[in-house]
Image (cartoon, rainbow, N blue to C red):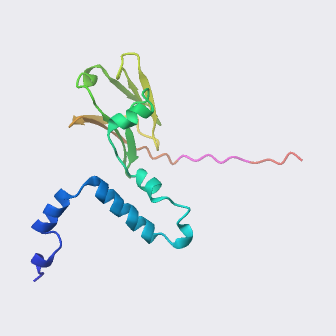
Amino acid sequence: MFPWNLFPFNKEMKNMMQQMKPEEIEKYVKDMLSKMLPQNMQGMVNPSDFLNKFHTGDSAAHASANPDQLQSSVFETHDHIFVRIPIIEEDWLKKMRLYHTSNQMIIEHIPNSNDKHTITLPALVKKKGATASHKDGMLEIKIPKSIDMQFSEIDVTDKS
């Protein structure tokens, strides 16, 4: 039988994790990254820059960088493309219009009635089958991917 009382995730570990500050955790991760990188790569990769790629931060900080751009995230699975948009005001759901082409997502009328945002999708999608759901202030659009296996060969002619 496994000695579960020796497992590191017990009540004391839980209490310790709750008492840690995010700054302490970030400092620890930076220290570990700097120790793990080989000496000849120390000057090439800055652990702070590396961590910033994973930092989610709050949407207000992102909005200040480009106030005209709608905050969204796009990712794909084997079968679908997902677009997530934070909904700041509930009335956006009533006035917004969503459209998509084979490779773009178009969002109109949010935050202002004359706004139009275009998001390039990472893969081709099907015309039918898209769904949108709203939960906990996040609008998630799920679009099935299109498998385009039609290849056209191009002949190269020598004009010399």
Left or right? Give the position of 61 relative to 44: left
In the image, is residue 8 above or below residue 151? below
Left or right? Give the position of 149 relative to 63: right
Q: Nearer the viewer, residue 141 or 57?
A: 57
Is residue 17 something one can see in this rendering?
Answer: yes
Stretch of the chain drawn in magenta: 150-155
Q: Nearer the viewer, residue 151 or 3?
A: 3
Residue 106, image x, y percentages: 42, 28
Magenta region includes residue 61: no
Q: Report the residue that reaches farthest toward the right.
A: 160
Q: Nearer the viewer, residue 70 or 37?
A: 37
Residue 146, image x, y percentages: 43, 43
Residue 153, image x, y percentages: 65, 48
Q: Look at the image and tell me in which quarter the N terminus lies.
A: bottom left
Q: Report the residue that reaches farthest toward the top.
A: 114
User: Residue at position x 43%, y 30% from top?
Assistant: 69
Left or right? Give the position of 140 relative to 15: right
Residue 73, image x, y percentages: 38, 41
